[in-house]
């Protein structure tokens, strides 16, 4: 990544996801479902052409930081998010384990 390609993360309330952009182009996103006092992260995607730049980690860190600062707990259904919270203990006290109820809530979106 060059100096002028700083990634930026923004929350899209209408699409219920956080997006990461590079030079104004959406490079990826992580989708969520709010339920009670929890935000269930269920799908993360980074475009192939943007792979290998650490964008998923940047995206997930920003999304989790925003979520927890809003007073919501994190539920990592998405494998990307689950791996991130396993490797980064700074969110340990704000993460709830994914249950069948969480998975059913996500499946009901389809």
Image (tube, rainbow, N blue to C red):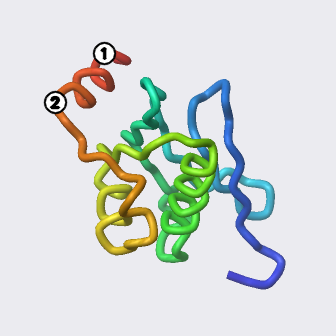
Query: Alpha carbon of mark 1 to alpha carbon of mark 2: how far?
Result: 12 Å
Q: In the rendered view, does 46 fall on the left or right side of 103? A: right
Residue 13 image offset from top left, x and y in percent: 67, 30
How many other residues sit within 10 Å of disc 1, few (<14), some (14-19) or many (≥20)?
Answer: few
Q: Which one is nearer the viewer's eye here, 89 or 12?
A: 89
The residue at the point 76 percent across, 72 percent down is: 6
Disc 2 target residue: 100
Identify the disc placed on residue 23.
none
Cβ atoms under marks 1 and 2 closer than 8 Å: no
Secondary structure of the residue carrying numbered label 1:
loop
Residue 39 image offset from top left, x and y in percent: 46, 37
Q: In this view, does 10 lie above or below 80?
A: above
Identify the disc placed on residue 108.
1
The quarter of the rendered structure image containing the C terminus is: top left
Outermost residue toward the right?
4
Q: Which one is nearer the viewer's eye here, 65 or 103?
A: 65
Q: In this view, does 75 lie above or below 23?
A: above
The residue at the point 48 percent across, 76 percent down is: 52
Q: Is residue 43 above or below residue 106?
A: below
User: Splitting the image into 4 quarters, where does residue 58 fall?
Assistant: bottom right
The quarter of the rendered structure image containing the N terminus is: bottom right
Q: Which one is nearer the viewer's eye here, 2 or 55?
A: 55
The residue at the point 54 percent across, 63 percent down is: 61
Secondary structure of the residue carrying numbered label 2:
helix
Q: Is residue 66 above or below residue 61?
A: above
Residue 99 image offset from top left, x and y in percent: 19, 36
């Amino acid at each position: 990544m060059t100096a002028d390609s700083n990634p930026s993360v923004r929350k899209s309330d209408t699409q219920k996801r956080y997006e990461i952009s590079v030079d104004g182009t959406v490079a990826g996103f992580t989708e969520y479902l709010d339920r009670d006092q929890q935000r269930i992260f269920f799908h993360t995607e980074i475009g192939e052409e943007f792979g290998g730049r650490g964008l998923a980690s940047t995206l997930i860190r920003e999304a989790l930081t925003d979520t927890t600062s809003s007073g919501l707990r994190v539920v990592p259904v998405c494998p990307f998010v689950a791996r991130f919270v396993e490797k980064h203990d700074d969110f340990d006290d704000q993460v709830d384990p994914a249950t069948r109820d969480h998975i059913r809530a996500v499946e009901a979106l389809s």
